[in-house]
Amino acid sequence: MAKKVAMLGMDALMPTLLERFVEEGVLPNFKGLIEQGCFCRLRSVIPAQTPSNWQTIATGATPGTHSVVVWGAHRPEDPVPECHREEAFSSGICLAEYIWEAAARQGKRSVVVNYAGYPPTTDEVVFLDRIYRPARSYYDVALPTVYHTLNVDAGEGVRFSEAEGWTCLPSSRRPPLEAEVKVEPSSEGEGPRYMALLWAEGDGYDTLALCRGRDMGRSVLRLKVGEWSGWVKETFTTEEMGEVEAAFRFKFVECSPDGRRFRLYRSEAFPTDGRFCSDPELGRKLVEELGPYVHAMMTVALRVRGGILDWDTVDEALSDEAVWWSEASRVLMEETGAELLYLHWHLPDLVEHKLVPLADPTGTEYSPERSGWAWEELRRYYRAMDRFLGEFLRWMDLEEEVLAVTSDHGMPANRKAVSLVNAFLERGWLELSPDGTSVDWARSKLFFEQNHLWINLEGREPTGVVPPEEYSDLRAEVQKLMREMKDPETGEHVFAFVLTREEAPVVGLWGENVGDLVFCYSGGYRWSGDEVLRMGEGRVVFPCGGGNHGPMLPTYETEVGSVYGVLVLAGRGVRKGVAEGPSEKGSRCTADVAPTLAYLLGMDPPAQNEGRVLQEFLEDLAHEGPRRNLVPLGRKVRQERPRVPQLKGDVTDEGR
């Protein structure tokens, strides 16, 4: 039995890229962990989305059981088309027991970092942050930004002018310049404002100060190009958090000699009072020992989505985050005596949505000219993931403890989008808003979300418009239409399957929470909603870029992209050097993580668990299959042949 079990969840860590970069030799920590333990693909539950699968990884239950069947859940009593999207990671929406709840029942404590399942449902768990939107912290007081003079639609533009009315101006070889810099809070309210002073200690502008007013005697920081500031602590007044002290820092990224090209990065601002921890006293202890909370995903977004931040700054922020999260996990486990750690980190998903479509030749966005840059960016981020893993390996003892690296899904590139809105409008099944820019789902005969479609049924839905006697015929008609939908350019079926609720258990979906129809798109095709009306897109199937992971079959994979997730497992009780064979691909599911980790920790799995213990990876359970000799059992008997040829049937139907 392991003394501790840690599950590091890396959202969308992809097996194809992991295998490629390990082989290239750029991921030494992953390589070592795989050699010490086991590696396999994980088949996502449907949909292959973040909420449904992280809830499954924590419960061992499938979506029909834990109820998170889309990005949220639609229940019969909910008004159409309510799916509780904002609560998709909440403990209030999940109907299955979490592994940390099962641990509490059995006398074990847990630490949960940036994961689903908040608010806590047991006193035996400590939460650090919680998932709100996957790449954002729930507790940011201000989002990060870049103050700049560039002509780009990202960050915050600043205007410099000649400094006037300042006290104690420094000596400068060029006229000092000034600009106002504001720290805008995430919610309504007020944050600090500074006056920036830029001057030239050398031949060009190279030195920056942020001051309270036009007074160098009240400077908050002074930086040269390339330097980071220390932590700045200021009081914000916000609608969400009231009056709160928060900490942030700056980096003077760039300044041309003439001052015309200027970039100043500011990090996220987080409270210093420990409220980001479910036990604020422990949160304050973390701040005292480790410094202010670091959560760098929205900093990464400044580069991935806005293209406004350089790699070195992003890499430094990711390095600091890796150290802080690792040390915080260690401290919390030691302080509470916890034996179980569950952690979610969103970096792979954040970057792959943008980069995989540029690197995968099967995607619409691919171009040979851009693929080289995309591959180098992917390598950079995967090195950062390897460093993140390395920080945990530094203090974990795999002779006595277990470490699992898990992902919920991967990220293939999109080829085309499918518009059910346009297809259903032609049949008169949808009603539009008066201005025609959206669907009035409450007045429509059906509504859909991701991989599920519901009939707006009288007596079940609060706004039901379809009489019960019309239900079966309408559902059959919708199913037939979807099954027959093809890409007009290629002739491919855009749906891999379309099943009724009664048929859906064959793909692991059952219960009153699933749709009346359950479906998966074929590889490379993605969903869309009524945004097509506002886009002016009238086609049912049309080209689109980007990467996606929820719509398609969980087993879809190309040479570059994959919907599969990953499990790397090593430590006490785990076999060494075991990798999946080609015939085993897809045989393990995200539902298998919780029962396997529970077994290694010497406890029973969560109550509603539907996964299996991956015994083939465990030292005390693995065994080779029995050896068999095939002995022919046929007999040379006379066969009665029917006078009229018949289709071949079961042996009991055939002649004797």
Image (cartoon, grey):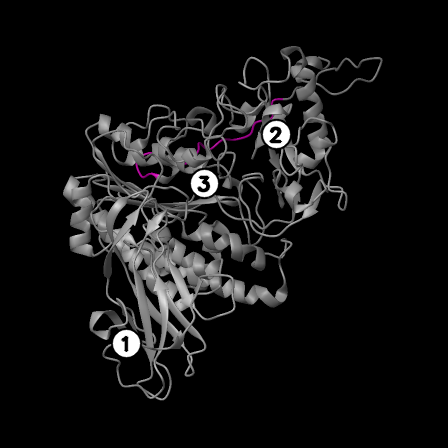
Question: For numbered disc 1, what is the local secondary structure?
Answer: loop
The residue tagged 3 is 50
- Give how far across and how far down residue 200 sits, in percent: 33, 84
| Residue drawn at x 74%, y 28% as measured from the top left | 427
Is 584 on the left-hand or right-hand side of 526? left
Instruction: Give the residues drawn in magenta, as a range.
Output: 618-633
Quick one: which residue is furthest to the top in this view?
Answer: 469
Quick one: which residue is furthest to the right in this view?
Answer: 643
* Magenta stretch prevailing secondary structure: loop
Quick one: which residue is furthest to the front in this view?
Answer: 165
Q: Earlier in the sequence, mark 3 or mark 2?
A: 3
Instruction: Give above or below for 298 relative to 307.
Output: above
Q: Earlier in the sequence, mark 2 or mark 1?
A: 1
Instruction: Give above or below for 467 relative to 237.
Output: above
Residue density around tag 3, few if under 14, some if 14–19, many if 20 or more, within 10 Å: many
Viewer-side label of 1, 3: 1
The residue tagged 1 is 166
Q: CA distance from mark 1 to mark 3?
A: 52 Å
Viewer-side label of 2, 1: 1
Tags 2 and 1 touching, CB below 8 Å: no
Instruction: Give above or below for 216 relative to 139.
Output: below
Q: CA distance from mark 2 to mark 1?
A: 58 Å
Tags 1 and 3 touching, CB below 8 Å: no
The residue tagged 2 is 440
Q: Residue 52's image quarter? A: top left
Q: Is residue 621 magenta?
A: yes
Question: For numbered disc 2, what is the local secondary structure?
Answer: loop
Is 333 on the left-hand or right-hand side of 241? left
Question: For numbered disc 3, what is the local secondary structure?
Answer: helix
**Between residues 238 and 95, which one lies in front from this camera angle?**
238
Instruction: Give above or below for 48 relative to 642.
Output: below
